Amino acid sequence: MGLRREARELALQMLYAQDTLQGSLRDTLRGFREGVETGERTREFAEALVQGVMEHREAIDQAIVARSKNWALSRMPRVDLNIMRMAAYELMFKRDIPKKVSINEAIEIAKKYGDKESPAFVNGILDELEACPKDEERSDTE
């Protein structure tokens, strides 16, 4: 498994823990630093993803909701939601990562961690997000 895939999977676990435990982000990151053995570059990429998602969570969640017909965030499986948040962050705010890579990685992670419908659900939402006209949601801020 590549460094970035491993980092994305670690970031998913961090985001899920953050959602479930609802403690401080600092405590969540510290818990993973102390409790999960991984390479420094992997951890740095994972933490950057988590921090980016949390910093832009409102905009990311709005983008997901706008593309999810008849699905409130509260009804979405947390694993799927956090996979989409991670990929949406990359799609919307990370110009150095090709959009197709972000989507494909999210689908593969959904296959591993979600249920049998997760890959199609995640793909559908992210394809809609990728198709936003003229990169209107892609930011130059990072």
Image (cartoon, rainbow, N blue to C red):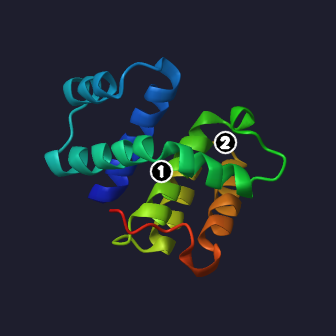
Return the mark for residue 115: 2
Percent across and percent down for residue 3 are 27, 56
- The answer to which quarter of the image holds residue 47 is top left
**Tag 1: amino acid:** Met
Quarter of the image for the N terminus: give it.
Answer: bottom left
Percent across and percent down for residue 97 are 38, 70
Quarter of the image for the C terminus: give it.
Answer: bottom left
Query: Seen from this angle, which residue lies furthest left?
Result: 40
Q: Is residue 112 in view from this perspective? A: no
Q: Is residue 57 above or below residue 2?
A: above
Q: Mark 1 — residue? A: 86
Residue under the image location 38 percent in, 71 percent down: 95
Residue under the image location 45 percent in, 70 percent down: 101
Mark 1–mark 2 Cα distance, whole angstroms, equals 18 Å
Residue under the image location 68 percent in, 67 percent down: 128
Percent across and percent down for residue 16 are 49, 32
- The answer to which quarter of the image holds residue 141 is bottom left
Q: Is residue 94 in view from this perspective? A: yes
Q: Is residue 127 above or below residue 88?
A: below
Q: Is residue 99 above or below residue 84?
A: below
Q: Earlier in the sequence, mark 1 or mark 2?
A: 1
Residue 9 shown left or right of residue 134 in the figure: left
Return the mark for residue 64: none
Density class for disc 1 (Cα within 10 Å; few <14, some 14-19, many ≥20) is many
Quick one: 135 or 113, which is closer to the camera?
Answer: 135
Density class for disc 2 (Cα within 10 Å; few <14, some 14-19, many ≥20) is few
Percent across and percent down for residue 91 are 49, 65
Q: Under tag 1, what secondary structure?
A: helix
Q: Under tag 2, what secondary structure?
A: loop
